[in-house]
Amino acid sequence: QVQLVESGGGLVQAGGSLRLSCAASGRTFSRYNMAWFRQAPGKDREFVAAISHYTLTTTYADSVKGRFTISRDNAKNTVYLQVNSLKPEDTAVYYCAADIQNSGLSGSDKAYDYWGQGTQVTVSS
C-alpha cells in the first residue's frame, strides 16, 4: 500500500506560481515512479508530468512544457510540481500518482496504482 497526500494548491492570479507537494508513505519511495495529473470541471483527467524513481528522468504534457517542473526528494518521500506562468486553463484539481510497477513514464492514468486525494488550483484572469 502507498498513501499519498497532496498540498500547496490555492487561488492565484494569472501569471503567478505555486509549488505543489505530494508526501508518500507505505512503501520505499525511491523504488517507484511518480506523476502528476489534473482534472478540470467537466473534463477528463489528464496527464501533466512524470518522474522516474532512480535516474530522475522527466516527461511533460505539451501544454505545460516550459512552465511546470516536476522533481522529487527521495530522502523526504516527496514529489513536487512547481507551476509557473499559470493560466486560467490550468485551473483543476491536481493529483499525484504512484506507479509501483515502474511501467515507464506513462501518460496513461491506467499505469498508476495509487492516487492522492487532490489539491485544488484556481487561476483567476
Image: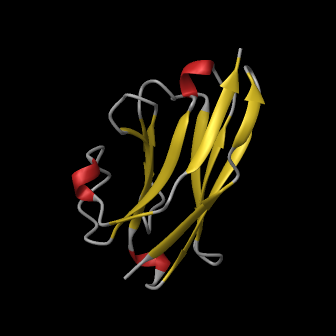
Point 32% across, 52% down: residue: 105
Between 64 and 42, the one nearer to me in the picture: 42
The percent coordinates of residue 66 (x first, y second) are 58, 28
Q: Quadrant of the N terminus?
A: bottom left
75 vs 98, left or right, is right
Quadrant for residue 84, please give it.
Answer: top right
Q: Is residue 17 above or below residue 96?
A: above
Between 94 and 102, the one nearer to me in the picture: 94
23 vs 37, left or right, is right
Extreme residue in the top direction: 125
Extreme residue in the front direction: 42
Q: How is the image coloured?
A: secondary structure
Quadrant for residue 41, please give it.
Answer: top left
The percent coordinates of residue 77 (x first, y second) are 58, 75
Point 58% across, 55% down: residue: 71
The percent coordinates of residue 123 (x first, y second) are 67, 26
19 vs 64, left or right, is right
Q: Is residue 85 visible?
A: no
The percent coordinates of residue 108 (x first, y second) are 26, 46
89 vs 115, left or right, is right
Between 28 and 94, the one nearer to me in the picture: 94
Point 42% across, 78% down: residue: 2
Q: Quadrant of the C terminus?
A: top right
Q: Is residue 16 above or below residue 22?
A: above
Q: Is residue 31 visible?
A: yes
